[in-house]
Amino acid sequence: MLKAGLFNLEFERWQDTEFGYRLRKLGVIRFFDFRAWVLHYKQEFTDKEKIIKHFYKEGKYAAKLLKYHPLFSVKLRTGFFPFFPLWKILYKHQLNSSKGAYIKGFLDEYFSKVK
């Protein structure tokens, strides 16, 4: 795990997934043990503005993950699909929804010049 560099602190979301991809690049094989417990803290949102911000960040860091690891499996995991430029057209009316915020965050990060 130390050789992989631990968690990338540039990510606020998707840290575990990004770390997993680096481990796989080093040849680490994963296996599942259904007796193991994993708990993810999920914040409960009641304020629509907070929900939108949350999903915008989810999309932003999903795109960042894809920039770091441009693999088909990452595209599937993050919701990227071959005709994703159509997102702007298809979800233009939903930009104030959680799905629209995710897509906007994804597109903003994906097309930014910074890796």
Image (tube, rainbow, N blue to C red):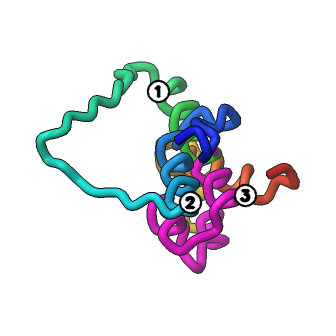
Q: Secondary structure at mark 1?
A: helix
Region of the chain picked out in magenta, as a range: 61-89
Amino acid identity at mark 1 = Lys
Residue name at image x 20 percent, y 34 percent: 37
Eye-nearest disc, 2 or 3: 2
- Residue 26 numbered mark, or none: 2
Residue name at image x 63 percent, y 67 percent: 89
Q: Secondary structure at mark 2?
A: loop
Vertical position of residue 100 compared to residue 28: above or below: above
Residue furthest out toward the right: 113
Which residue is disc 3 drawn over? Answer: 110
Which residue is disc 1 drawn over? Answer: 48
Amino acid identity at mark 2 = Leu
Q: CA distance from mark 3 to mark 1?
A: 25 Å
The percent position of residue 74, horizontal first and vertical second, equals: 52, 64
Residue 73 falls left or right of residue 66: left
